[in-house]
Image (cartoon, grey):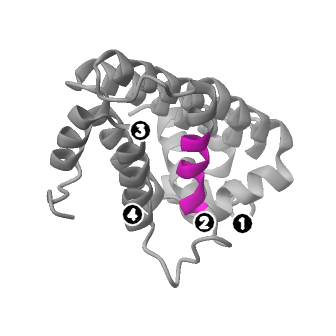
Amino acid sequence: MLVRERILETALKMFRTYGVKGVTMFDIARDCGISKKTVYEHFVDKQALIDEGMQQLLTNHINYFTECLQTTDNAIEEMVRNMKYVTNLAKTLNPVMLYEIQKYHPDTWKSIESFKEDGVLCNIKKNLKRGMTEGLYRQNLHIDIVARMRQLQLEAPFDQMQYPANQFEMPEVMEQVTAHFILGIATIKGHKLANQYLQIKEDE
């Protein structure tokens, strides 16, 4: 692995674990086993590391969404797989990172907000259209309204005010809201598939 890639990977791991404010360039250098001077040779400052790190993270998300769309058998499988991806991601992401980026790095936060609109929301709309075409989702869905509702659901488990970590397990919250959402928009045909993917018993 090239030095620059190793620096970026280490910084991202530390940001996701500890947040961005408390991590210094010296911390990153020490974790990489290199000098701080070497870090600065590749990244002019910590802001540059944060910007590139977040961009890489968002690009990885987009790539996964695209791959998931292409490799799943139907819209419900796609939505469930995306839900599991977000859940696994959240296990390695300290919410304080997003809070600190929003508060102390507004320009970086703008790119995350754009990703929510152009990446996440767009992907949800594609999934809804796919499900309607496949006869798995109801035909009378107002896509713009329902897509935004789903986006809010995806963000809700990260909200410590709504779901405090000492009271709720984030994966369970995500699974519950996703099951509720899918069953709410699915046709009878869709319900049967949803029961399989979500492992819901017929009599529940």
According to the picture, the residue beneath numbered tag 4 turns out to be: 171
According to the picture, the residue beneath numbered tag 3 turns out to be: 185
CA–CA distance in space, label 3 to label 1: 43 Å
Can residue 134 be seen here? The reply is yes
Range covered by the magenta-colored residues: 149-158
Question: Which of the pair 35/107 is nearer the observer?
Answer: 107
* Label tally: 4
- Above or below: residue 136 compared with residue 86: above
Would you identify the image quadrant in which residue 175 lies? Answer: bottom left
Residue 140 circle label: none
According to the picture, the residue beneath numbered tag 1 turns out to be: 22
CA–CA distance in space, label 2 to label 1: 7 Å
Q: Amino acid at mark 2?
A: Tyr
Image coordinates for residue 11, horizontal then vertical, percent: 57, 49
Image coordinates for residue 3, horizontal then vertical, percent: 49, 36
Q: Amino acid at mark 4?
A: Pro
- Name the quadrant of the C terminus: bottom left
According to the picture, the residue beneath numbered tag 2 turns out to be: 18
Callouts 4 and 2 close, C-beta under 8 Å: no
Mark 4 or 2 closer to N-term?
Answer: 2
CA–CA distance in space, label 4 to label 1: 27 Å
Q: Residues within 10 Å of mark 3 (few under 14, many from 20)?
A: many
**Closer to viewer: mark 2 or mark 3:** 3
Q: Seen in the image, is 97 located left or right of residue 9? A: right
Q: Residue at x 45, y 67 (%)?
A: 170
Callouts 2 and 3 close, C-beta under 8 Å: no
